[in-house]
């Protein structure tokens, strides 16, 4: 946190379960998010990383109030988003933006680029005479120019479509953007361009970004802080450079060890995340059944340890 200024976003003990089976006297739930807490400072990029089903996107939906929480709180600019009036909620929508995974499905194919970027301005009742100026500024900020405004999404490349999605997300000058796997549908070279663009927007516009991805290489290259999730729970949290240099949690270590080499000469045996070898222990460590160093004490819930500015969910940290 810079100085003594409060965080832009504060997530407190957020939890979400989904009902997956219901019988007469029995209900079975899937825990998507389990007691998650973190903060996002102004002009910070926070990375959320984990396997599919780790709860990354669910956390994003909860933060944007697209789904209802079971417990916990999300505080944006000092106010709980779950206690906002209709007028305050509309302001909250204006101050937050979202970039989805696949621009082929997130952009309306029947609308021109101009109309796509204009949509948020119409929803928030921005005067018509001011819209064109904002749209042109947004398209340039996203790395395109006015010649794209009359085109349709089908006439654009994948990278160009994602730039249009970014232009739509920033046209209202939000303070926070949720980027949900924004590079996963793109070629590697285009991924780097989009990452550079998001970093530029962070610096120039002081936008905070929550960057969701399963790709540690991508998250590690863009984020200031990093949260590693497993089955809805935070395994490790801290400054990205510290975690990359020396991961503490066994799950984080395995994730890094499983990354492909940056050059064929650096090829090594990839340590895959072990498949289930033990039964889940109710009340024990969530990673117990796949952990390569698990012991008897791991059958009890670990206490989250704070070590050198980092938080780790592990007995061995």
Image: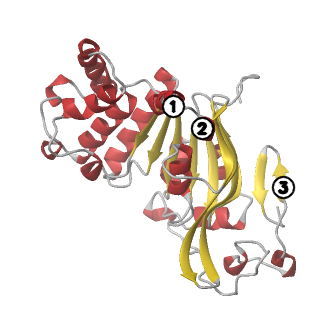
Q: Secondary structure at mark 3?
A: strand
Q: Is residue 67 visible?
A: yes
Query: As drawn, is 215 to the left or to the right of 83?
Result: left
Q: Quadrant of residue 26?
A: bottom right
Label 3 crowd bin: few (<14), some (14–19), many (20+), radius 10 Å: some
Q: Are marks 1 and 2 in contact (CB under 8 Å)?
A: yes
Tell me the residue at 71%/78% (across/down).
Answer: 292
Label 1 crowd bin: few (<14), some (14–19), many (20+), radius 10 Å: many
**In which quadrant is the C terminus drawn?**
bottom right
As measured in the structure, the alpha-carbon distance from the residue carrying label 3 to the one carrying label 1 is 34 Å
Front position in the image: 218 or 245: 218
List x then y, in percent, for residue 85.
Answer: 56, 32
List x then y, in percent, for residue 204.
Answer: 47, 21
List x then y, in percent, for residue 65.
Answer: 52, 45
Closer to the N terminus: mark 1 or mark 2?
A: 2
Front position in the image: 237 or 80: 80
Q: Residue under circle 1?
A: 92
Position of 16 relative to 240 (above/below): below
Q: Residue furthest front?
A: 24
List x then y, in percent, for residue 260.
Answer: 48, 64
Q: Secondary structure at mark 1?
A: helix
Q: Residue under circle 2?
A: 81
Q: Secondary structure at mark 2?
A: helix
Query: As drawn, is 253 to the left or to the right of 108?
Result: right
Q: Of tags 3 and 1, which is closer to the observer?
A: 1
Position of 28 relative to 65 (above/below): below
Tell me the number on the disc at residue 305.
3
As measured in the structure, the alpha-carbon distance from the residue carrying label 1 to the one carrying label 2 is 8 Å
């Amino acid at each position: 946190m810079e100085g003594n200024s409060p965080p832009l976003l504060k997530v407190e003990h957020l939890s979400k379960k989904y009902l997956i089976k219901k019988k007469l006297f029995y209900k079975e739930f899937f825990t998507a998010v389990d007691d998650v807490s973190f903060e996002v400072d102004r002009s910070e990029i926070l990375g959320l990383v984990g396997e599919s089903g780790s709860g990354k996107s669910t956390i994003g939906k909860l933060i944007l109030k697209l789904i209802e929480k079971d417990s916990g709180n999300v505080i944006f600019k000092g106010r709980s988003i779950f206690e906002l009036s209709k007028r305050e909620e509309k302001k909250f929508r204006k101050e937050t933006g979202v970039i989805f995974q696949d621009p082929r499905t997130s952009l309306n194919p029947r609308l021109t680029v101009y109309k796509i970027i204009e949509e948020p301005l119409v929803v928030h009742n921005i005067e018509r005479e001011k819209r064109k100026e904002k749209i042109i500024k947004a398209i340039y900020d996203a790395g395109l120019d006015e010649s794209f405004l009359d085109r349709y999404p089908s006439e654009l490349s994948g990278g160009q479509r994602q730039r249009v999605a970014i232009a739509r997300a920033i046209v209202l000058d939000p303070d926070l953007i949720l980027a949900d796997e924004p590079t996963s549908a793109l070629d590697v070279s285009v991924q780097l361009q989009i990452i550079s663009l998001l970093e530029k927007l962070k610096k120039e516009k002081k936008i905070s970004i929550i960057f969701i991805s399963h790709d540690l290489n991508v998250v590690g290259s863009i984020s200031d802080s990093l949260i590693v999730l497993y089955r809805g729970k935070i395994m490790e949290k801290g400054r990205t450079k510290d975690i990359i240099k020396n991961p503490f949690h066994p799950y984080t270590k395995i994730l890094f060890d499983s990354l492909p080499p940056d050059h064929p000469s650096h090829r090594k045996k990839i340590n895959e995340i072990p498949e289930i070898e033990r039964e889940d222990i109710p009340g024990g460590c969530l990673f117990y059944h796949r952990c390569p160093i698990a012991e008897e004490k791991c059958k009890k819930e670990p206490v989250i340890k704070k070590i050198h500015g980092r938080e780790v969910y592990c007995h061995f940290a």
